[in-house]
Each structure stands twice: as structure tokens, then as C-alpha cells.
């Protein structure tokens, strides 16, 4: 019997691969709106971030999300991520 394939995604900060369910997905929609995607299926440019306080703080300090999404990411996004840990 075949084993089920587990979707793996790369964290934009650590550049390590993790299971998709173990990461946050942050999306930039066509309208330019940036938001946290709880469904992991929203349309738009998506980046993944490890569910870890230190990783989120590093992303904020280095502007990793802003570079990956090619737009400004507000502090409220980082606060929302920290509250969901």
C-alpha cells in the first residue's frame, strides 16, 4: 500500500522544510492586502513562517515577510501571529 504524501513547505526565515500544518501562511492578495491565512488555501502570493516566537521576532527584525511578499507588512500581522502561538 502506498504511503500518503505529506505536503512540505519552506519557512522564509529558517529556510528549513516543515509539514504544511506546522507553519503559518501569510498571503498578499491581488489587491495588495496582507493577511494571515488560517485555511492555508487563500488565493494570492503566500509565504510560510514557522510557528515559533523567536522565528516571528526574527522575521519582524529582518523584514523577511516584506521582502518575500514585496510589500510593507504592518506590525499588526506580527502581533496576530504571536497571539496565535
Image (cartoon, rainbow, N blue to C red):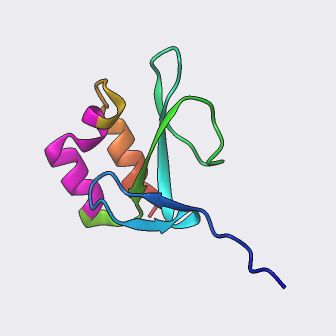
Query: How many marks do you count on the picture?
Result: 0
Which image quarter holds the C terminus? bottom left
The x and y percentages for residue 50 are 39, 62
Residues 48 and 72: in front is 48
65 or 18: nearer the viewer: 18
Outermost residue toward the bottom in this view: 1
Q: Position of residue 56 (x, y in %)?
A: 29, 56
Q: Quadrant location of residue 13?
A: bottom left
Q: Is residue 28 above or below residue 78?
A: above
Let me know if residue 64 is in the magenta part: yes
Screen quadrant of the N terminus? bottom right
Residues drawn in magenta? 55-67
57 left or right of 78 in image: left
| Frontmost residue, 57 versus 20 | 20
Residue displayed at 51% across by 14% down: 31
- Work out whether 45 lies above or below 33: below
Amino acid at each position: 500500500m502506498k504511503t500518503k504524501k505529506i505536503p512540505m513547505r519552506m519557512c522564509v526565515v529558517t529556510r528549513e522544510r516543515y509539514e504544511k500544518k506546522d507553519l503559518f501562511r501569510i498571503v498578499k492578495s491581488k489587491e495588495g492586502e496582507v493577511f494571515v491565512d488560517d485555511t492555508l488555501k487563500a488565493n494570492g502570493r503566500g509565504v510560510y513562517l514557522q510557528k515559533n516566537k523567536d522565528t516571528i521576532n526574527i522575521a519582524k527584525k529582518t523584514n523577511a515577510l516584506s521582502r518575500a511578499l514585496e510589500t510593507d507588512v504592518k506590525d499588526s500581522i506580527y502581533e496576530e501571529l504571536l497571539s496565535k502561538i
